[in-house]
Amino acid sequence: MQWTELIVFTLLFGFVTVLGFVAARWRAAATLDHLDEWGLGGRRFGSWITWFLIGGDLYTAYTFVAVPALLFGAGAMGFFAMPYTIIAYPLVFLPVLRLWSVSRARGYVTPADFVRGRYGSSLLALLVAITGIVATMPYIALQLVGLEAVLRSMGFNGAGFLGHLPLLIAFVILALYTYQSGLRAPALIAFVKDILIYVVILVAVIYLPAKLGGWDSIFSAAEQKFSESESPADGLLLSGNNQLQYATLALGSAMALFLYPHSVTGVLASRGRDVLKRNMSALPAYSLLLGLLALLGFAAIAAGVTPITNNATGRPDSNTIIPELFNSQFPSWFAGIAFAAIGIGALVPAAIMSIAAANLWTRNIYKEYIRRNATAKDEAKQAKLASLVVKFGAVLFIVLIDPQYAIDLQLIGGVIILQTLPAVAIALYTRWLHRWALIAGWAVGMLWGMVLLYQIPNPASGRAHFGGSALALDKLNVFGWQPFEGSTVQIYVGFVALIANLLVAVVVTFVIRRMKGVSNGEDATTDEDYHVDEHDENLRPIAAH
């Protein structure tokens, strides 16, 4: 047991726990019994709070352990996170402004709320809601993977229930203050999380190269390791087989990022369009931090770090690479701060994700299909309970299933959420795509995406199916026709499934429009709704029924 690290970790964890409970009274309205207040923080967050909230939401504990671990294991492919986070913000700059405006004008809390209003289709809204919840669940579970990696490095590496007990205690505390404070809790804690992360990474990228002989020695060690690798895909540079995978994964991930319900929650909690403009312009600064963090994967190679064996599975846990790097190269007290930064970095996004999933359940399933006459207070109570279920469902997922499988599922989550792009993102600009065509496109994209993912093995883990998201073009089969037969070039499955989704949606729309007489639903929004701002006259009051 690493007692110094554990004490520092516990003290900082205790501090953010207090902040979580105090957050209930931070800028609070008369009551939190409304989704505008509990689920969206009163829709009043300014530039700085939104910066930390969205940053804390998108740059998660899993990011901080998995990206450098991927560079440690595979090299250049792990850098896909850099272009993806750089292009994401310009890509979504205008769409998120329109989504904020129409949601503020109409009182929408979730992306499925918007789809319901735009197309008058409860079925399409239900599919978007279910897709969002399913894609979010493995993402929450992956925050636990990051937190468990830290706990494992501090000595909590038992098999069975006792090995997971510290994780369970941490998430009981998280569940309690999220239940009480709603979105205000992760928003306030995000300040602490981001400050700790910045301090830890900046110290690490200055101190480690000095200790390990400079970046030249670090890159030389990485090059030597990859030259001895049996996999042709590993290396400091991309190979001919994985360049297309790299590009499509970066683009697909960028398009998916703000389709996730927790990303939308951070956007809708903002005070106005100017706040979002400033944040979309400034958030790429996090990409600099991510790039520096990623390079720690190479530093771990130079330092001779080896992953800890997970006593529950008997296999090395690659997610412990960065915690072990800090454990071996830094004083115990600083390693404790680094562990706390990663641990708190798990709590912030896990809280926001559980709130976002709870909002979807409450507004688009519970109120739409179970209790249509639910009051605002009923909705808030239902969302609080749902957030508890989501959190502990994720904990059970980690306890009962091999965590490596959860990592594979995160890749599936990106493929899943991309299938909502036509119904959510494109609908912000046009209703030309017919609602039944959107449903058909969603079904085809989802089905084909799952079929393709099923065919992908993972030799490293011995898994025959759902072993990743990189598909060889040779495996693309359209009703027996193989357009790229014999090709070993890889592509991101999510990108392929989205193309199929869009093609089907366009073709079915043409067919339906030629048939005529098939209703495309009633649009509850107006052109003016997509341009409203915080100071407009006659703007819908916050927490209005």
Image (cartoon, rainbow, N blue to C red):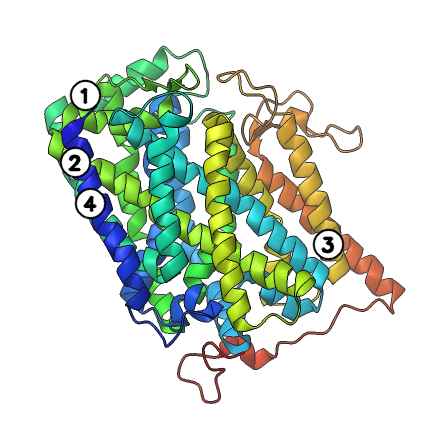
- Looking at the picture, which amino acid does disc 4 mark? Leu
Label total for image: 4
- Looking at the picture, which amino acid does disc 3 mark? Ile
Residue beneath the point at 45% across and 51% down: 353
Neighbours of disc 4 within 10 Å: few (<14), some (14-19), many (20+): some
Q: Nearer the viewer, residue 256 or 136?
A: 136
Task: State how far apart marks 3 and 1 are (Cα).
Answer: 54 Å
Disc on res. 532: none
Whether label 2 touches label 1, CB < 8 Å: no
Q: Earlier in the sequence, mark 2 or mark 1?
A: 2
- Looking at the picture, which amino acid does disc 1 mark? Ser
**What is the residue that sits farthest to the bottom in this orientation?**
537
Q: Nearer the viewer, residue 198 or 369?
A: 369
Q: Nearer the viewer, residue 490 or 132?
A: 132
* 207 in relation to 250, above or below: above
Q: Is residue 342 left or right of residue 87?
A: left
Which image quadrant for residue 69? top left
Q: Which residue is mark 1?
A: 217
Q: Earlier in the sequence, mark 3 or mark 1?
A: 1
Residue beneath the point at 76% across and 33% down: 478
x and y, in percent, of residue 208 in the image: 15, 29
